[in-house]
Image (cartoon, helix red, strand yellow):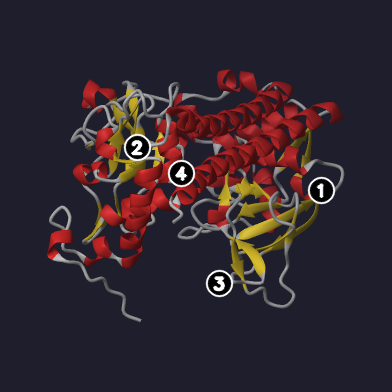
């Protein structure tokens, strides 16, 4: 069905003649914005910023030499809704950037170039205490005046109202994109300071919960490492030329059934020897009640069952699963089952099922269900830790497309600690996952609060 708008020449804005700018959805929303302006006030983004919106740049010299100082390089793929993924951001040599390139604290960053509209408009905030960072031409940097809460602005841009404003001003050329001046034309609700602060505080609380979740997980890692004496590991690892090869006896290759260098990499053998020497270890297979490989299925918008693949593993749990038709006899993962990536570029990526009662999963994943003798949260941390990841990498087979076979997964060594120590680690992991969900709840609450204020004020 054709969709069009009739717009008089006098109603054209900013010399824009493109149909997307005058889509009926956006024109209908303009009437709501007028009512909103009469009741609570509306302003253009350009009037609440302390300086012009700018983008970053990509320096010519990006090669990091030796141990020279580096700075985080924020790009489209590391700007997430609300926060920046610093763990996966690129690095630049500090000498290649200037002081004016560094993004100041409390600046809002927004993706403004992408292949699809969904990529454009992702918004996050650089907080005090975040690593020093710069960005490229695909990300806009927005610094608000002191009387406008940037955390409120972050919540607003994640609502339908904020995203529609971004998409309206974007131009659909070879890529969806805005320039900095178009960003400054975006309409923003000009709420009273106390309303902005109340919503901004929900976003701040969301960040605080996420930070606590990270610390809890780090504490669990530290406890595991202390129990195993892994704090001494770096001092005893082989260095230099000796770190690049292993001397292996014939009997050891026969036991492994492998003769390739990957299986006997110094890192893998060092961890194996360390675990045997510093505590009780068992094979992973002895802790698992069952291991089941998934089945590849197509995503459907209104499927009968929740469905996940590797891309749905994030932060060591399964989130934002899609749905599938669910064929007869489809095997389903349950709460506290572990899903492990066994093919592709991210072999070893692991997550626990917490948000779904029953979950279908793709053929790239192996579902591991534990016996009662081990807490799956403790096992999650061990397998996500380097001591688990190194072992997974050791047993990968295949050249062009790697694969991790269930029989090889069963060989992975798992350290067993005292019941008290394992319980403490498991509890820290549970609390970490819980804080992440609390963070998401608070962020969603802030977005809903913004949308509710707008929608109530815009009623006829």
The Cα atoms of the two marked residues, 4 and 1, are separated by 41 Å
Q: What crowding class fits label 1: few (fewer than 14 Cα within 10 Å), some (14-19), or many (20 or more)?
A: some
Dot placed on the residue nearer the N-terminal end, 1 or 3: 1
- Residue labelled with disc 2: 109
Residue denoted by label 1: 286
Label 3 and label 4: CA atoms lie apart by: 24 Å
Q: Which residue is mark 3?
A: 300
* First in sequence: mark 2 vs mark 4: 4
Nearer the observer: mark 1 or 2; the answer is: 2
Q: Whole-percent x and y of residue 439?
A: 59, 37
Left or right for 179, reference 417: left
Tell me the SS state at disc 2.
strand
Report the residue at 85% width, 30% height from top: 419
Task: Tell me which label, 1 or 2, sits earlier in the chain.
Answer: 2
Q: What residue is disc 4 on?
A: 81
Quadrant location of the C terminus?
bottom left
- Residue 458 as seen in the image, left or right of residue 299: left
Mark in the foreground, 4 or 1: 4
Dividing the picture into quadrants, the one containing residue 308 is: bottom right
| Cα distance in 3D space between marks 3 and 2 | 33 Å
Image point (32%, 67%), residue name: 24
Q: Is residue 283 left or right of residue 453?
A: right
Q: Mark 1 or mark 3, which is nearer to you? A: 3
What quarter of the picture does the N terminus occupy? bottom left
Asked if the residues shown at circle 1 and circle 3 are in contact, with their CB atoms under 8 angstroms apart, the answer is: no
Give the foreground label among 3 and 4. 4
Q: Position of residue 273 (x, y in %)?
A: 68, 31
Mark 3 vs mark 4: which is more N-terminal?
4
């Amino acid at each position: 069905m054709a969709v069009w708008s009739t717009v008089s020449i006098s109603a054209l804005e900013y010399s824009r003649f493109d149909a997307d700018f005058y889509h009926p959805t956006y024109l209908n929303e303009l009437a709501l914005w007028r009512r909103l302006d009469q009741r609570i006030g509306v302003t253009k983004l350009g009037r609440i910023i302390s300086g012009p919106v700018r983008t970053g740049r990509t320096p010519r010299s990006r090669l990091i030499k030796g141990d020279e100082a580096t700075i985080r390089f924020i790009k489209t793929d590391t700007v997430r809704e609300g926060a920046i993924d610093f763990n996966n951001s690129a690095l630049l040599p500090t000498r290649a950037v200037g002081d004016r390139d560094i993004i100041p604290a409390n600046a809002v960053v927004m993706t403004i170039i992408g292949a699809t509209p969904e990529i454009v408009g992702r918004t996050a905030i650089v907080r005090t205490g975040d690593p020093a960072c710069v960005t490229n031409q695909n990300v806009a940097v927005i610094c608000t005046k002191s009387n406008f809460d940037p955390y409120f602005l972050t919540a607003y841009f994640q609502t339908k109202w904020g995203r529609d404003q971004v998409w309206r001003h974007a131009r659909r050329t070879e890529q969806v994109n805005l320039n900095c001046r178009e960003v400054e034309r975006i309409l923003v609700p000009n709420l009273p300071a106390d309303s902005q602060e109340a919503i901004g505080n929900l976003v701040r609380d969301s960040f605080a919960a996420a930070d606590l979740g990270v610390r809890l997980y780090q504490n669990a890692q530290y406890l595991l490492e202390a129990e195993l004496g892994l704090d001494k590991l770096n001092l005893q690892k082989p260095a230099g030329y000796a770190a690049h090869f292993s001397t292996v006896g014939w009997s050891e290759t026969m036991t492994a059934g492998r003769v390739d260098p990957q299986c006997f990499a110094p890192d893998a053998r060092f961890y194996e020897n360390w675990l045997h020497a510093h505590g009780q270890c068992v094979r992973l297979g002895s802790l698992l009640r069952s291991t089941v490989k998934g089945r590849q299925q197509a995503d459907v918008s209104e499927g009968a069952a929740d469905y996940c693949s590797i891309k749905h593993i994030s932060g060591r749990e399964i989130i934002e699963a899609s749905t599938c038709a669910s064929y007869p006899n489809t095997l389903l993962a349950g709460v506290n089952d572990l899903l492990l990536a066994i093919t592709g570029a991210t072999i070893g990526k692991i997550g626990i099922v917490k948000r779904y009662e029953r979950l279908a999963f793709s053929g790239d994943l192996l579902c591991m269900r534990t016996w009662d003798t081990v807490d799956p949260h403790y096992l999650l941390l061990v397998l996500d830790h380097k001591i688990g990841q190194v072992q997974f990498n050791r047993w990968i087979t295949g050249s062009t497309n790697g694969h991790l076979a269930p029989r090889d997964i069963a060989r992975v060594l798992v350290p067993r600690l005292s019941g008290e120590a394992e319980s403490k680690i498991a509890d820290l992991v549970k609390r970490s996952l819980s804080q992440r969900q609390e963070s998401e709840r608070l962020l969603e609450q802030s977005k809903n609060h913004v949308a509710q204020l707008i929608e109530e004020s815009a009623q006829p």
